[in-house]
Amino acid sequence: MKVLPFNLNTTVVTRAKGEKVDYIEPGSHLCKITSITTSDDLDNYNVSPFIDFNVTSNNKVGRCRFWAVKQTDKPKTQEWKTKQIKDFLINAGVRDFSDDSQAMNDAVGKSLMIAFISEEYISINKQTEEPVIRESIKYRWSSKEGGKCTYNPDMNKQLTEDEMSEFSMKHSEWTKNANTDYVGSDVEDDLPF
């Protein structure tokens, strides 16, 4: 009987509906790489290709996203993207880079120090269409396990004054429209008395 590999590094595990997930917060954390996800794994995703290294730290989850090198990238951008992911892999203890895919898979199960930062952005609540300010946690850089991985709160990106003005304007417009959407009916036949 031939045993097939599990391919655990590419297996996506979904959580039960309502299961609480704690996410890594901004700061420097000792993390373990648990799996890899690529943009190819997503249905109907046809924008910029990426590779996510899914990580855990103290029972919290996070991801380190690296944008794939594209032919249309400028040479300096291609070089920066390549150096960024190679630095991450070296810090995870990967030593053999003769095969890109294998080098990335070799990182699964390894630990390293990772600095995460937060970035605020304007979004829309899908249920109410209300403009909201959200925060995403992003990979900043890494170092070897036990190494120094600097994080300062001033690395976090907050909305600029112009973005806050844009948000306030959008939210005021939404509030005005939300308040005029419901107009009471003259017929009160559904009252309980």
Image (cartoon, grey):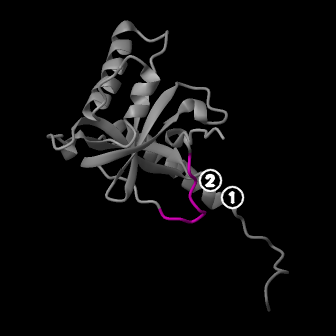
Magenta segment boundaries in residue numbering: 12-20
Is 16 inside the magenta-drawn segment?
A: yes
Q: Secondary structure at mark 1?
A: helix
Identify the disc placed on residue 177.
2
Quick check: 94 above or below 131?
above
- Coordinates of residue 78 in the picture (x, y in percent): 38, 13
Q: Are marks 2 and 1 in contact (CB under 8 Å)?
A: yes
Is 184 inside the magenta-drawn segment?
A: no
**Foreground of the two, 129 or 88:** 88
Residue 145 falls left or right of residue 36: left
Which amino acid is tagged 1?
Answer: Asp
How far apart in space, not on screen, are marks 2 and 1 (Cα)?
Answer: 6 Å
- Coordinates of residue 89 in the picture (x, y in percent): 32, 30
Q: Residue at x 35, y 26 (%)?
A: 85
Residue that mark 1 sits on: 181
Magenta stretch, main secondary structure class: loop
Density class for disc 1 (Cα within 10 Å; few <14, some 14-19, many ≥20) is: few
Q: Secondary structure at mark 2?
A: helix
